[in-house]
Amino acid sequence: MSTESVVTASRDETGAPAVPGPASGASSGASSGAEPAADGGPAADGGPAADGGPAADGGPAVDVTRLRVALARLSRRLRKHQLAGLTPTQLAALATVERSGPMRLGDLAAAEGIAPSTLTRLVTALEDSGYVRRYADPSDARASTLAITPRGHDMLERLRTETTMVLTQSLTLLTPAQRAALAEALPVLEQLAEPPGS
């Protein structure tokens, strides 16, 4: 089977392929008890029950814990930041600079939700790796503008290629019916990935 026939790569907010969580559960049969629910917990009022009980709106129940575990496991498999010698936070910031274009350091800190002291270390690491370059802001002598370098862009493209290959190989293990179910669920997963109210 051609791997090109079972996957179309898309990018999420970090520049990596979008993560279709149920593929992991479909191929591995992971259950909710396979790992600690460190970032889980009961669903908010009005949402589906964490244990897969009836939803408050009368719709189909969703096992929230199982979904969370599947998404977390797949995310770890696709995480390739170590290939660039960066932390996940540094990689996310670099992708933001690439996506938004040259931007002030304060704007990057706001976009990533990080403190100024953390931003200074983060930008220094990206500069030392040759992934970004800092310029003086011509409109404000006190501010700096950050732009991605060709080396940084090439590195992000390499990571996207690596994660797409991993995901493509996983999809070839699914049955046609499983791939069809995953394709149908993609719009819902994309909606879950968006910030609330966006």
Image: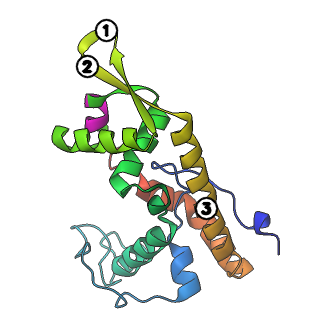
Q: Is residue 173 left or right of residue 40?
A: right
- The answer to whether 85 is drawn above or below residue 112 in the figure is below
Q: Which residue is at the far top?
A: 139
Residue designated by label 3: 162
Residue 38 lies in quadrant: bottom left
Q: Within the magenta stretch, is there residue 115?
A: no
Q: Quadrant of residue 106?
A: top left
Task: Please say if the residues under marks 1 and 2 sit with CB atoms less than 8 Å apart.
Answer: yes
Secondary-structure class at tag 3: helix
Q: At 29% from the left edge and 79% from the top edge, which residue is drawn?
A: 50
The Cα–Cα distance between marks 3 and 1, rounded to whole angstroms, is 39 Å
The CA span between labels 2 and 3 is: 36 Å
In the rendered image, which residue does mark 1 sit on?
139
- Closest to the observer: 23 or 131? 131
Indicate the quadrant where residue 97 lies. top left
At which x and y percent is residue 5?
79, 65
> Which label belongs to residue 143?
2
Is disc 2 placed on a helix, strand or loop? strand
Depth order, front residue of 101/72: 101
- Extreme residue toward the right, this view: 1
Instruction: Tell me how far mark 1 sits from mark 2, CA to CA.
Output: 8 Å
Q: Amino acid at mark 1?
A: Ser
Secondary structure beneath dot 1 equals loop
Q: Residues within 10 Å of mark 3 (few under 14, many from 20)?
A: some
Which span of residues is magenta-colored?
106-110
Q: Earlier in the sequence, mark 3 or mark 1?
A: 1
Picture disc at residue 93: none
Residue type at the position of mark 2: Ala
Give the side of residue 19 with respect to residue 52, left or right. right
Work out whether residue 33 can be spotted: yes
* Residue 108 is one of the magenta-drawn residues: yes
